[in-house]
Image: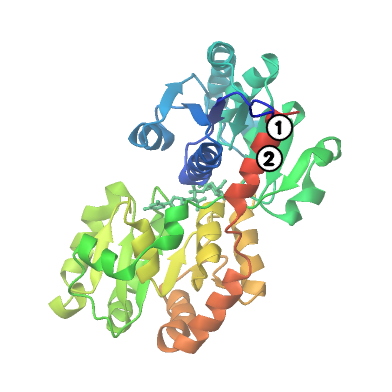
Amino acid sequence: MNSAPQLASTFRLIVTGGGTGGHTYPALTAIRTLQERLSADGRALDVLWIGTAAGLEARVAPAEGIAFATVATGKIRRSSNPLKMLSAANMKDMARVPLGVVQARKLVADFRPDVVLATGGYVAVPAGLAARMCRRPLVLHEQTVRLGLANRKLAGSATRIAVSSESSLPLLPEAVRGLAVVTGNPVRPQVLTGHADKAIDALGLHGFDRRLPTVYVTGGAQGAQQINGVVSEALAWLLERANVIHQCGGDKVEGLREHAAVLPQALRNRYYLTGFVGPELPDVLALADVVVSRSGAGTLAELTALGKPAVFIPLATSAGNEQAHNARHLEEAGAAVALLGDVTADRLKDALGPLLTDAARREAMALRARAHGRPDAADRLVDVILSAASD
Ligand SMILES: CC(=O)N[C@H]1[C@@H](OP(=O)(O)OP(=O)(O)OC[C@H]2O[C@@H](n3ccc(=O)[nH]c3=O)[C@H](O)[C@@H]2O)O[C@H](CO)[C@@H](O)[C@@H]1O
């Protein structure tokens, strides 16, 4: 007879978070990694994702076969100006939060999770508060250096706060610093195992010249107008030196396609334009020799885990300069080039030029980028989830 302590055979997890890719993919990766860990112990995972109908999670969770429920929630438009925070739109949205809490509380009470994992985005607030009301352990995961708005609201209710970098620790409110664990930002495992040749076949890139480097341009899940603008201005120059995969955001494809239509056919053959890169993302990253990108935490975690030379064009928001901080940090380590402030096509060319012509330079930058990667982040986050359940 086996005298080992009997563990409940099914682990019950509620995940909440989303809106953008930066909050959605770490949640998905945590689910998959936990599932693997449990199944190695002969246990099952029962998971419910609480998100919003408008967020990326509403597409991702059902496509992954994960049970999904929505609650009412309000998008809080951030601003450094406190008066703007009190705008009519914000007040109306904040008024929806209590309804969301009531709905989330019922979901949490009915599901009886062992742990609630919140990965940020405004939808995490009602579900996180409901976890506390139902006395369920709440694990927060923060991708960026400073706690995001949702995690700041939830920090006082958390059992553990998993952060992505050591530099977050001194910035946490003192009262919750003891709850923090540095895990890194989980990267989808398949992102690390792409194949360049598969990208050529899957996307039909047979016009690419494989003697030239390939640049992957990405503006994050929604695309970035600023990046689209400078890249299309520099496009002819770029295509004379490289193949380009340009992820521009779903509604921007037509305009950019027209812009490229005037280029000579030989150059157009080396240009692939798409609104969003779906399951082929790992292969696209494997093909890329250089990445031009926003410096959101998710993209950064992926590029450093892989070791990719990058030119970052950070998003500038009134609420802070998180992305600029990320980009500058990697630039100081010689792991990327950061284009801060006004970005022009000429600045982009100056940054890309030496990288496109010098493979050794790319390799040196890639090595330094890899030193910042944390490929074990998902495993560490799963450790935190499991330990929170047994508190
Ligand atoms: C505008 C905004 O609020 N940005 C924030 C948002 O980033 P946001 O979600 O915009 O960007 P991230 O870089 O964090 O994540 C994007 C994710 O989407 C994936 N992807 C992107 C494009 C595509 O075509 N296919 C695809 O799969 C990327 O590989 C990555 O996994 O959350 C991050 C994490 O909290 C923050 O650091 C960012 O400042």
The residue to which callout 2 is attached is: 384
Q: Residues within 10 Å of mark 1 (few under 14, many from 20)?
A: some
Q: Residue furthest left?
A: 265
Residue flagged by tag 2: what amino acid is it?
Answer: Val
- Label at residue 388: 1
* Contact, mark 1 vs mark 2 (Cβ under 8 Å): yes
Disc 1 under 8 Å from ligand 1? The reply is no
Residue in the image at 56% along x and 37% along y? 41
> Label 1 amino acid?
Ala
Quadrant in which the N terminus is drawn: top right
Residue drawn at 47 percent across, 53 percent down: 189
In the image: residue 64, left or right of residue 125: left
SS at circle 2 = helix
Q: Quick one: 253 or 48, which is closer to the camera?
A: 48
Quarter of image, res 151: top right
- Residue 86: where, in percent of width, then height? 63, 27
Q: Residue at x 71, y 39 (%)?
A: 161
